[in-house]
Amino acid sequence: MKSRMFWALLIGALISGGTAGAQTIGHAAPTVAAPGSGTTIVSGRAAASDSAHSYDAQALRFETHWGSADIIRGADGPVIGTVGWFRDFDVEKLVASSPQAVTEARAFKTNNFRGSLVGGIGALTLAAGTVITANSSNNAASPILIIAGAGAMVWGAQALNAGYSRLSRAFWWYNRDLTR
């Protein structure tokens, strides 16, 4: 059953030949100035060419859900990337126009990697301790493995939380430096 779904998806992707542009940078819709009207046409829509519209379209934000975060451009804009447990998106390149934002993005990347690695190792250690305990092994190492694994998971969660705080600061600095 699963292989049928895989082949159907693969054939559909090959037939359509489309590419997903939501997680790429630099593929904005073409803009054309309407003659003498002071408006700009973006993909068939007329938009005022004021600076508030430009800021609203370029500002970055993120929404978290169950250990990952979608990076979104604008109020109702597209998802341009996803970060989270063992997921990496080049946030430094995204916020490159602001030096303070790049510094915060680097700190996010470090905290995200450390939190993912230590949290993952902690989960494996906790699982190993639980399996050893479940097999009725009278082993003194099993409670140590469980406690160490839980502690590593807590530390990893704190590092991930610190990383998301740095991501928030990176976006704040980037948005602050946008022209309005």
Image: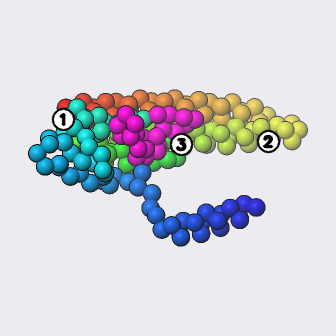
The residues bearing labels 2 and 3 have C-alpha atoms spaced at a distance of 24 Å
Do the CB atoms of the residues marked 1 and 2 lie less than 8 Å apart? no
Q: Residue at x 59, y 69 (%)?
A: 11
Q: Is residue 170 visible?
A: no
- Outermost residue toward the right in this view: 136
- Determine which residue is flagged by label 2: 131
Q: Residue at x 71, y 33 (%)?
A: 146
Q: Is residue 85 left or right of residue 133?
A: left
| Residue 109 x, y percent position in the rendering | 41, 42
Residue 85 image label:
3
Q: Looking at this view, is 103 or 16 the one in front?
A: 16
Q: Note whether 25 is above or below 50 in the view shown.
A: below
| Residue 84 x, y percent position in the rendering | 50, 41
Image depth: mark 2 or mark 3 in front: 3
Image depth: mark 1 or mark 3 in front: 1
- Determine which residue is flagged by label 1: 50
Three-letter amino acid code of the residue under disc 3: Trp
Disc tally is 3
- Outermost residue toward the left in this view: 36
Tag 2 secondary structure: helix
Q: Is residue 145 left or right of residue 97?
A: right
Range of magenta residues: 63-83
Of the numbered discs 1 and 2, the one sitting upstream in the chain is: 1
